[in-house]
Image (spheres, rainbow, N blue to C red):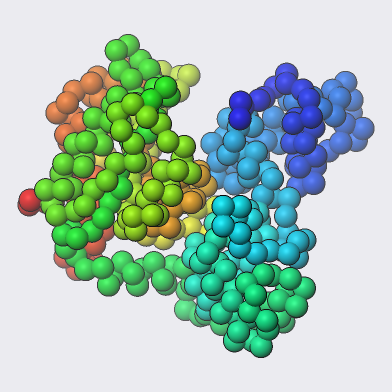
Amino acid sequence: MQPFGQGDAGPAVADVRAALVALGLLRYPSDRADTSSPGDCYDGSCELAVRTFQQQRGLTVDGLVGQETYRALTAARWQLGDRVLGYSAGHAAVGDDVGALQTRLLELGYDAGRADGVFGRQTELALRGFQRDYGLADDGTCGPATMRALRQLGRKVTGGRPQLLRETTALATAGPQLLGKRVVVDPGHGGGDTGHRAESLIEAVLTWDLANRLQGRLAAAGVTAELTRGLHNNPADGDRARFANAIGADLLISLHVDHAPSPRAEGASTYHFGTGNGVTSTVGEQLAGLVQREVVARSGLTDGRTHAKTWELLRLTRMPAIRLEAGYLSHDGDRRRLADPGFRDLLAEAVLVAVQRLYLPADVDPPTGTYRVIC
């Protein structure tokens, strides 16, 4: 969809305003002192409400309603119990009610996967398991009878967040060797979407080059490394996530470079899945932190730190996934660095080292910026 913002009007804007009102982030025009804007106009108060919602939901805070923000607004309308939930191949139910169901199943000890708000096959299997154990019809749908049972039961899993326990256990049992691991490398943009441009540098070309450098290093270390796109195509983020899920990847690393209106914005940042209310990919957060520290220590880029986001690529992947923003094309110093192939080699090496450190036991994990992976 085409993003819309201040000054736009129409049924889609009215729908967004209604969702924001239902969430308590916006009042009806008749309740405001300024009633000059009709109910289908995207005015300043609407933009402020959208920015607040984006901040709360781990989205890009730009005040524009694009596909990601519209999806999140639609999902936020649903509360657990509002509708019957079930699995349908190709037409997955999405909403806050699904996320609440997944969280509840996880708390009861059933592996519903990440609480991402998407009713997939793993959520259905967890729900069926719960229904069987508690004498309900195991039809895999969450209707009135299942809702009553869920409300009556207390939490079973203790000693930490259930998904944290599963992710850290899986990481510990994977072993320290990179040989045999499968990593998906995602060069941002591509095809007709070139991303940001500055002077002769194009984001899609830079990410493609960096991805190939990283893929080569991973392969030399014994990793099966796959790219999400070719040189001239641009799959949707959902398709990139489905590709990684289909091949059973252990990790996904998405590569981007940033741009800002201010030429003073600079540095590298990393992102992992997290909603801001306790739902997070624990191993994804750990990997994002390792990549951030290695990149900053080796490159001299300013530390933009690590952040939780609910972007589709991070949300829909079944494995820990991160996104690296490796500097700003709009900043003179970052741009000069990114134009240097040797610097891009350095970035690829930093990411490789971070991947290796993820799997090393804590007692042998080396200090940041000192380790080399021997291929």
Total label count? 0
**Above/below status of 101 relative to 76:** below
Observer-nearest of 283 and 228 = 228
**Above/below status of 343 relative to 335:** below
Q: Position of residue 106 (x, y in %)?
A: 54, 72
Q: Residue at x 53, y 76 (%)?
A: 110
Quick one: which residue is furthest to the right in this view?
Answer: 30
Q: Position of residue 230 (x, y in %)?
A: 30, 33
Image quadrant holding the N terminus, namely top right
Quick one: which residue is furthest to the left in this view?
Answer: 374
**Above/below status of 328 relative to 268:** above
Observer-nearest of 102 and 259 = 102
Observer-nearest of 343 and 250 = 250
Q: Position of residue 152 (x, y in %)?
A: 72, 82
Position of 205 compared to 132: left or right? left
The quadrant holding residue 357 is bottom left
Position of 154 compared to 203: left or right? right
Q: Residue at x 40, y 31 (%)?
A: 234
Position of 44 compared to 317: left or right? right
Position of 106 compared to 219: left or right? right
Q: Residue at x 21, y 68 (%)?
A: 175
Q: Residue at x 30, y 28 (%)?
A: 231
Residue 328 in sight in this render: no
Q: Position of residue 210 (x, y in %)?
A: 24, 33
Residue 75 in sight in this render: yes
Quick one: which residue is furthest to the front in this view?
Answer: 89
